Image: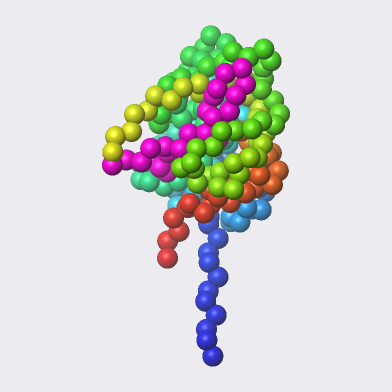
Amino acid sequence: MEETPPAARRPRVVVFDYGSGNVHSAVKALEKAGADVTLSGDFTEAMAADGLFVPGVGAFDAVMAALESSGGARIIDKRITGGKPVLGVCVGLQVMFDRGTERGVETEGLGQWPGSITELPAEVVPHMGWNTVRVPENSRLFRGLEDERFYFVHSYAAQEWLLDVIPPFTEPALTWADHGVPFLAAIENGPLTATQFHPEKSGEAGITLLRNWLDTLPLPE
């Protein structure tokens, strides 16, 4: 009798709990996408996970202060340096840049990417609701989602990309959207992935996107 092959292990994801909102909806969405999910701010758990989900709601300076005080900034840096996947969402994308400027206050970010987060010069802010995105050919995150819409809630964004990638490093996949001006809706750059929209609020398209991210996580034997 042939042996039944063992079921593939579900990827283990930590939703980093540092006081930002949307954590429970993120947990549910990741579970629906196929992950074993833990909500935790513990260093050891966050470092051991196959993937780390970094939510972000509110002001740039408040999110940075919470990440610094919780040890999250160190965890994110150590994971990325070690090639361990991180997914940042909304302000969780924004803080990956050098700095953010909100209401005249400039705050230093995590510095994973060069550049600044600034207010969208649009007639209506915040940019709130469903919007389409422009997906590049090299995207794995948006596989099968090229014509879908995603849910945004933000007034600030990265409006330019300044990182020069030198071979043999792979060019990042940059997904753009428009609200008054073009802005970065998602970035796939090695172990660091981030979305300006909320996958956990984007219905089935968001679940599929999270499943695509889970599929990129390297799982140990």
Q: Dividing the image into 4 quarters, which one contains the N terminus? A: bottom right
Q: Is residue 85 left or right of residue 145?
A: left
Placement of 32 over or under 145, stated as above or below: below
Decide which of 19, 204 is in the foreground and name it.
Answer: 204
Residue positioned most to the bottom: 1
The quarter holding residue 219 reads bottom left
Indicate the position of residue 141 as horizontal and vertical percent values.
53, 44
Give percent across and percent down for residue 112: 40, 31
**Residue found at x 29% / y 34%:** 166
In the image, residue 150 lies in the stretch drawn in magenta:
no
Q: Which residues are magenta?
A: 168-195
Q: Nearer the viewer, residue 76 or 149?
A: 149
Would you say 65 lies left or right of 127 here?
A: left
Residue 157, located in which quarter of the rendered image?
top right
Write the residue at 68% across / 39% down: 202
Q: Quadrant of residue 142?
A: top right
